[in-house]
Image: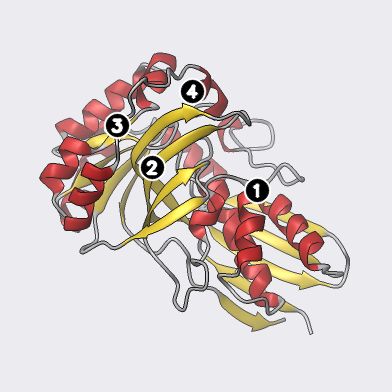
Amino acid sequence: MMTIARTRPPAKLNLFLEIPARRHDGYHEIDTVMTAIDWRDELEIRSIAQPRIELTTQWIPSAAAVGRQLGVDVGQDGIPALLRIPTDESNLVSRALAGFRDRFGIATGFRVRLGKRIPAGAGMGGASSDAAHAISCAAQIHQIPQGSAELHQLAASIGSDVPFFLPPLDAVDQGYSAALARGRGEKLSPIATRTSIHFVVAFPNFSLSTASVYGALRVPKVAIDSAAFLAAFGAGDKLEMGQTMFNRLAEPALEIMPRLGELIESLWQSGLRPCQLTGSGSACFGIAEDAEHATDVVKRLKIELQPGVLLQAAQTVSAAASIEIEPS
């Protein structure tokens, strides 16, 4: 009997991000605090008898609707260039499932439907989350224990952020909403948080190349340690968080795309504190006082900034989303 798994992969934000050093393997050492948020994609994976991976993607509610909010022109196929999602082996979901089949000797294949809401080139980890949840769904379908070391090894081979979205090693529950990540991002330490944090997240109508941002990065002689931010974050002290929140990639990202500074300023002027870039951009975010404040800010900024920016009120959630299983 074939099986269907459904889940809703969340995005992430980097609340703190330092780059202490360059590595000999071409990567960078990172020291980052990530939290998952409820800006979610939709993923459905069905086992099929044929030994192949079939992937289809679509934007929710549609590419045209998202394109209108961003104020970008659609191509002949009705999809703006900014919103084109590959369906071949370059898509991390396909790569993750191909790796899963190889690692566990799976003779059958997968048919995948991916509904996109999380923009690409945003620094929000959408592709990484999709890949991690594809691995988790495949593991559920083939009755491989969640939180196993093999799944984490596979995830780390796909991308630095991917393991963050898996249930923790040997976990008995779904896991954490935030974690400290070091090394290339694969060395994870879950962080206990006292309360939910509410955000307003803004994605402008341009993306940034991670390689370009890292290429313009000047690695500091003396790195800023995450300890002060971790203490504030763990205590839920928003004032201290605002004074210690940091992103080393913000400077090179703003050099490449100065317009990001205007977007961050718009978030700040709306009463969000603090505000900064996530990852290598181009998405930015600000911390709201509560859910109502976040919703009000989104309403006001849509009047000011759209078309041109995707805006979303969000809050912290578990990095590993729940999975529904049903026979097909």
The residue shown at (62%, 76%) is 145
Task: Give the residue at mark 3.
Answer: 224
User: Which residue lies under the disc numbered 2?
Assistant: 32
Cα separation, mark 2 vs mark 1, equals 19 Å
Q: Nearer the viewer, mark 2 or mark 4?
A: 2
- Residue ID for mark 4: 213
Amino acid type, callout 1? Ile
Residue 200 against residue 171 in the figure, above or below: above
Residue 220 vertical position relative to residue 141 in the rendered view, above or below: above
Closer to the N terminus: mark 2 or mark 3?
A: 2
Give the mark toward the camera: 2 or 3: 3
4 or 1: tag closer to the N-terminus: 1
Give me the disc on residue 4: none
Task: Find out whether the residues at labels 2 and 3 contact each other: C-beta distance under 8 Å.
Answer: no
Q: Is residue 211 above or below residue 88?
A: above
Give the number of callouts. Answer: 4
* Amino acid tagged 3: Ile
Q: Residues within 10 Å of mark 3 (few under 14, many from 20)?
A: some
Locate residue 12, reporting x and y percent: 42, 49
Observer-side mark, 2 or 1, equals 2
**Element on which disc 1 rests:** helix
Left or right: 325 in relation to 207? right
Q: Cβ–Cβ below 8 Å for labels 3 and 4?
A: no
Find numbered disc 2 in the image and state the secondary structure of the residue it sits on: strand
Amino acid at the residue labelled 2: Thr
Q: For residue 133, which quarter of the picture? A: bottom right
Q: Is residue 49 left or right of residue 183?
A: right
Q: Is residue 50 visible?
A: yes
Crowd rating for badge 1 (residues with CA inside 10 Å; few <14, some 14–19, many 20+): some
In the rendered image, which residue does mark 1 sit on?
158
Residue located at (86% from left, 72% from top): 49
Image quarter in which the C terminus is found:
bottom right
